């Protein structure tokens, strides 16, 4: 089902994209908040300020934010710069405090999106407040949880809504703090084309080096904006020190970003695009035909194995297939790791087909 979404201030379709919300991981002092707000407003390119007040930390004993005491500084920063301020809310009690101090927007953090009970309570507290809400993806790569949180808010009448892609935690160490798994926000966008999506390259990267690349990828994929952490003195930040940019570094990055217009092509450009898309459609059809043929042969193999009491899975044969297709991919200039991933999926389906044959050899599983 579609979401009923309305643009919020600064996010209106007429405003220059990308919508950028920037500020420190956490509000640490009145001076720090006012200093960063002034610098970001002066540099331009930033449409809203962010600062964490209540910080959900992985381990106890880390800096957990200054709570309500920091809210008047944010209001002051907003009055000083004219920029709206946003904070993370993680508990229904936070909503009343946010309203009391004139905060203009809130986001739900990754560690809260994972919890449907808490999202439901927040949705109840946010209904009728008219506060715009950003929903970060859950920590784990689960699109349904992310979708569910957005739906819970929307069902309570919250329409000023956007998603924030901040990457997903995984067991394997990668160059990212949280791996982007771009296919997940892409699928979210496919399901809800009306929903704006921002990217948070700071929490994806965990350090500043890769931020420009990740931010550019997000824009190239048609994301609507960015949430980026910026601190006047990152090395002394009380949380997320490695990933926060000085405001002047952020200004350089924002200026270097290529913002593409993504207009619907007209005239010759659209003729050529349609031609190419026609080719792709034919190739896709050929691929599906080939896969259907392959699965029919697999079925015959399954029957043969059953008759001759051979096991479904033979590791040497599977290794041989992988080696062959990887070598061919290399020869043709196709990334072997991609072909390997694809064949893992094809192999899985082939095993399923043979299992079906073993369970019931009489049944024809294809037309
Ligand atoms: C944050 O934005 O500071 C934060 C805690 O982010 P996340 O919920 O994405 O970890
Ligand atoms: Mn942070």
Image: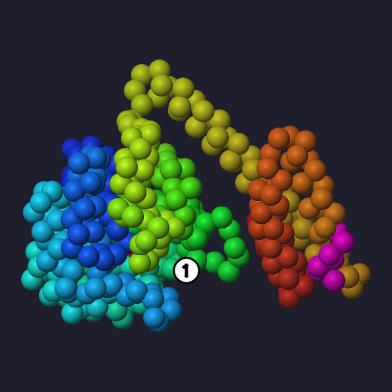
9 relative to 326 in the view: left or right:
left
- Ligand 1 is in which quadrant of the figure? bottom left
Q: Which residues are magenta?
A: 311-317
Q: Residues within 10 Å of mark 1 (few under 14, many from 20)?
A: some
Q: Quadrant of residue 111?
A: bottom left
Q: Quadrant of residue 256?
A: top left
Count of all numbered marks drawn on residues in the image: 1
**Residue corresponding to mark 1:** 140
The quadrant of the image that shows the N terminus is: bottom left
Residue 188 painted magenta: no
Query: Does 230 appear above or below 171?
Result: above
Question: Which residue is depicted at the point 82% across and 50% down?
Answer: 323
Give how far across and how far down residue 364 sits, in percent.
Answer: 70, 63
Q: Quadrant of residue 351?
A: bottom right
Give how far across and how far down residue 231 sits, in percent.
Answer: 31, 55
Q: Which residue reaches farthest top?
A: 268
Query: Does 350 appear above or below 190?
Result: below
Question: Which residue is depicted at the point 39% across and 81% down?
Answer: 61
Question: Which residue is depicted at the point 52% across and 57% down?
Answer: 176
Give the colour scheme shown: rainbow
Query: Does 267 appear above or below 108?
Result: above
139 relative to 149 in the view: left or right:
right
- Is residue 198 visible in the rendered image? The answer is no
Query: Does 19 appear above or below 170?
Result: above
The one nearer the camera, 49 or 284, is 49
């Amino acid at each position: 089902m579609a979401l009923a979404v309305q643009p919020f201030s600064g996010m209106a379709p007429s405003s220059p994209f990308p919508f950028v919300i920037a500020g420190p991981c956490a509000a640490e002092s009145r001076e720090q908040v006012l200093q960063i707000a002034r610098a970001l407003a002066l540099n331009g390119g930033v449409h809203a300020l962010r600062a964490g007040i209540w910080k959900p930390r992985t381990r106890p004993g880390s800096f957990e934010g200054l709570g309500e005491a920091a809210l008047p500084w944010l209001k002051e920063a907003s009055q000083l710069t004219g920029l709206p301020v946003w904070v993370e809310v993680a508990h229904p009690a936070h909503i009343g405090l946010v309203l009391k101090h004139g905060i203009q927007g809130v986001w739900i953090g990754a560690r809260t999106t994972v919890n449907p009970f808490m999202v439901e309570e927040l949705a109840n507290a946010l209904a009728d407040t008219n506060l715009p809400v950003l929903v970060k993806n859950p920590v784990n790569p689960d699109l349904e949880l992310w979708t569910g949180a957005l739906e819970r808010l929307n069902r309570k009448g919250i329409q000023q809504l956007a998603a924030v892609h901040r990457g997903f935690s995984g067991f394997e160490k990668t160059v990212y703090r949280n791996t982007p798994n771009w296919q997940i926000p892409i699928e979210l966008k496919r399901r809800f084309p009306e929903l704006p999506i921002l990217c948070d390259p700071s929490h994806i990267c965990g350090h500043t080096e890769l931020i420009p690349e990740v931010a550019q990828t997000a824009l190239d994929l048609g994301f609507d904006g960015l949430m980026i952490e910026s601190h006047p003195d990152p090395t002394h930040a009380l949380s997320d020190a490695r990933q926060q940019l000085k405001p002047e570094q952020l200004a350089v990055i924002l200026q270097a970003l290529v913002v593409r217009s993504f207009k619907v092509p007209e005239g010759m450009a659209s003729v050529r695009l349609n031609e190419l898309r026609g080719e792709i459609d034919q190739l896709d059809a050929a691929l599906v035909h080939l896969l259907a043929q392959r699965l029919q042969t697999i079925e015959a193999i399954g029957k043969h194995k059953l008759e001759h009491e051979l096991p479904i899975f033979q590791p040497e044969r599977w290794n041989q297939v992988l080696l062959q297709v990887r070598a061919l991919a290399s020869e043709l200039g196709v990334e072997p790791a991609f072909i390997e991933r694809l064949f893992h999926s094809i192999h899985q389906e082939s095993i399923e087909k043979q299992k079906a044959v073993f369970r019931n050899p009489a049944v024809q599983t294809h037309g």
